[in-house]
Amino acid sequence: MTATQDILQFAGASHELPLAVRKDAARLLADTLATGAAGAASLEARMLRSALDRWCGSGGAARLLSGNNGRLPASQAAFFNGFAIHCLEWDAVHDTAVVHALSVVTAALLAASDERGGSDSDEFLTALAVGVDIASGLGIAAMGPMRFFRPATAGIIGAALAVARLESLAPEQFADVLGMAYSFTGGTMQAHVEASVALPLQIARAAQGAVQAVGLVRAGFGGPHDVIQGPFGYSELIEPLALEDYTVTLGETWRISEISVKPFPSGRASHGALGALQALRAEGSVSADNWARIELFAPPLVNRLVGRVYRKGAPASYNRLCLAFLAPLMLRDGHIDPRLDETEEAAAANVIVSLVGSPDHNALSPQRLVIDLRDSTRIERVIKASPGSPGAPMSPEQAAAKYSLCRELAKACDPVIFTDPLRYATDPQ
């Protein structure tokens, strides 16, 4: 079989998740819904809801994470919820793959489950794990630097196959779903370069496209089939893939258990430095008043994602991806609030990201943080793993702090999101 056929067979096969994988899927679903509820309360999400109401009116089968009994047609709800989950840069990510797979897959599955009146909990979690696996796997297999935004390109494929599974499409229809999802693929890294709010809109479009792809196939439409390895397929046009690096462990290594949770509402590439600064502040080594200069030595991807120059008055979408903005806030407050106060311009100018060569275009490590204090003392820390990753999981206190802040922001949401997230996802009543 080809690697594409391996992926399609995995997407439609009967799976019983190992207990540890099922627990990871439920835990990450809870984190994603909490993050999405907080994002749904943001100014940007309220603006998006207004636009969606103008385009398609209000009312429909699928719930919105904003609460207040908001509903839209399933594809529009997937669009809104996908945006809400990612817009605060607080959503889980597969570090090696550089894919926010849960954001797209969860938004699409939630809409699909609502539209059909609910779903079985085990079937939902299995579909979630399968979709996240495929989306992450395409990132793992990637061999070059990102030109397209992987959560959108890989994400729509994983999400569409997850929805096809939840909706019990026939195995022979999965190839059409894959082809239709690829036909809807879009979203480049230009939005990230400019730190534009279009970035979460690309995730929104991917979640919407996944729901629409399955709906079209269910209605009888077919899609192209050789869309991963074909002459104009994903590997040729989006980015080159070594698919065997992923497919060799299909069904044995569940990629959802490799996902990192983000303690801070900021670009993932900022988390290593922010986590180290938080720890140094807590132990009293560094404070908002005693540091003079911060330099992070990191691979090119880190500089590309969060090494941007501070801009006074920049929008929140820019600041969440700017280490120079974030680091002084961490030393001042000990945490990052998604509402993001202004940073002192002089302090931001003294935060620098310097390049360390790496043959791995997707590498976020190794990183080394160097802090010069005003008394000429120098502190150095090697960052082996970013906080929230499987190698450096959040403490119970960190997890509780994140959920508490999400709940504070999401005052209007359905409280079941926080008390019983799996029931929220599978029982729209």
Image (cartoon, rainbow, N blue to C red):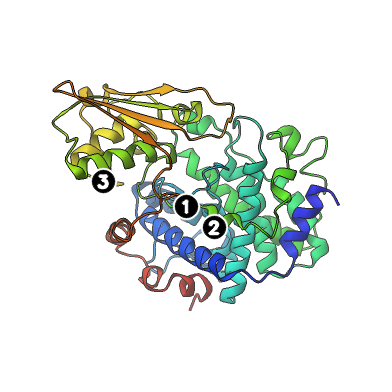
Numbered tag placed on residue 335 in the rendering: 3
Q: Earlier in the sequence, mark 2 or mark 1?
A: 2
Q: Residues within 10 Å of mark 2 (few under 14, many from 20)?
A: some
The residue drawn where x is 28% and y is 61% is 404
Which residue is denoted by mark 1 in the rendering?
390
Of residues 23 and 268, which is closer to you in this image? 23
Q: Earlier in the sequence, mark 3 or mark 1?
A: 3
As drawn, the residue found furthest toward the bottom would be 429
**Cα–Cα span, label 3 and label 1:** 21 Å
The residue drawn where x is 51% and y is 63% is 24
- Mark 3: amino acid: His
Q: Earlier in the sequence, mark 3 or mark 2?
A: 2
- Mark 2: amino acid: Ser
- Mark 1: amino acid: Pro
Residue 95 visible in the shown view: yes
**Cα–Cα span, label 3 and label 2:** 26 Å
The residue drawn where x is 28% and y is 57% is 401
Q: Are marks 3 and 2 in contact (CB under 8 Å)?
A: no
Q: Secondary structure at mark 3?
A: loop
Residue 341 visible in the shown view: no
The residue drawn where x is 27% and y is 47% is 337
Q: Nearer the viewer, mark 3 or mark 2?
A: 2
Of residues 81 and 354, which is closer to you in this image? 354
Q: Residues within 10 Å of mark 3 (few under 14, many from 20)?
A: many
205 relative to 220 in the view: left or right: left
Whole-percent x and y of residue 29? 48, 63
Numbered tag placed on residue 234 in the rendering: none
Q: Are marks 2 and 1 in contact (CB under 8 Å)?
A: yes
Which residue is denoted by mark 2 in the rendering?
257
Where is 413 relative to 235, above or below?
A: below
Whole-percent x and y of residue 256? 56, 57
